[in-house]
Amino acid sequence: EAQVTQNPRYLITVTGKKLTVTCSQNMNHEYMSWYRQDPGLGLRQIYYSMNVEVTDKGDVPEGYKVSRKEKRNFPLILESPSPNQTSLYFCASSSLAAGGNTEAFFGQGTRLTVV
Amino acid sequence: GEDVEQSLFLSVREGDSSVINCTYTDSSSTYLYWYKQEPGAGLQLLTYIFSNMDMKQDQRLTVLLNKKDKHLSLRIADTQTGDSAIYFCAETGTGNTGKLIFGQGTTLQVKP
């Protein structure tokens, strides 16, 4: 079954304690990205990767890091989380199809609370 | 810049039609999408439309695209309680980068 798997689904942490949210896809997609969802703001892209070892900033990258050492995995790292990073996070993957049809597959989401 | 706007809330009665509207700014977007998010779940692609089309119908869903006005709508016929969810409009933006630009999401409430 084609899927994007994120872990953990829920996380409560304290300010400044480093954490990693994992993301894995089994569709051999080139493109992966991280979004955060906040009420009234929709989804905003944090970072994206167009292939292995190729990552770039999205619209709201401050306070986040990513890596893409393998095609299937795209972890999101918060080196020193702060309360304003409390949010619902989604990982997504898609194939960079010719013609630009970007059908994205989303993980189930990670609800992060930073206290 | 790239921007997508949606109204935040829509309430309809079961059996009625729902129309969710979206406006976007990037006229170079090749594809426009509608995603559905059920409570506690990720986003699922509902349907999409290529930018050179005016309309696309898929069972109870009808997508209308007015490229001149940069207006996209999703009509759900015979709305059911299971259609209650948040609906996101998204565009591909400039170039084939894989990026999607999302609207704020419209919460659809279906009353029995």
Image: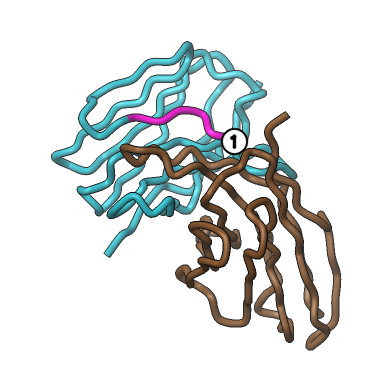
Chain colours: A brown, B cyan
Task: Name which residue lies at 30% across and 46% down.
Answer: B23
Helix, strand or loop at mark 1: strand
The quadrant of the picture occupied by the C terminus of chain B is: top right
Task: Name which residue lies at 25% across and 53% down.
Answer: B25
How crowded pointer 1 is (Cα within 10 Å; few <14, some 14-19, many 20+) is rated as some
Does residue B59 belong to the magenta stretch?
A: no
Q: Magenta stretch: dominant SS?
A: strand
Task: Name which residue lies at 33% across and 20% down.
Answer: B56
x, y percent for residue A89: 67, 60
x, y percent for residue A14: 85, 82
Task: Say if B61 sits above or below A57 in the image.
Answer: above
Task: Say if B66 sits above or below A77 in the image.
Answer: above
| Magenta highlight range | B44-49
Q: Identify the residue position indicated by label 1 in the image.
A: B44
State the residue in front, A44 or A6. Answer: A6
Tell me the kind of residue under disc 1: Gln
State the residue in front, A1 or B24. Answer: A1
The quarter of the displayed image where residue B36 is located: top right
**Number of marks drawn:** 1
Point out the residue furthest to the left here: B68
Task: Say if B8 sits above or below A75 in the image.
Answer: above
Which of the chains bears the disc numbered 1?
B
x, y percent for residue B1: 27, 65
Left or right? Give the position of B53 relative to A33: left
The quarter of the displayed image where residue A100 is located: top left
Task: Name which residue lies at 63% across and 53% down.
Answer: A71
State the residue in front, B92 or A25. Answer: A25
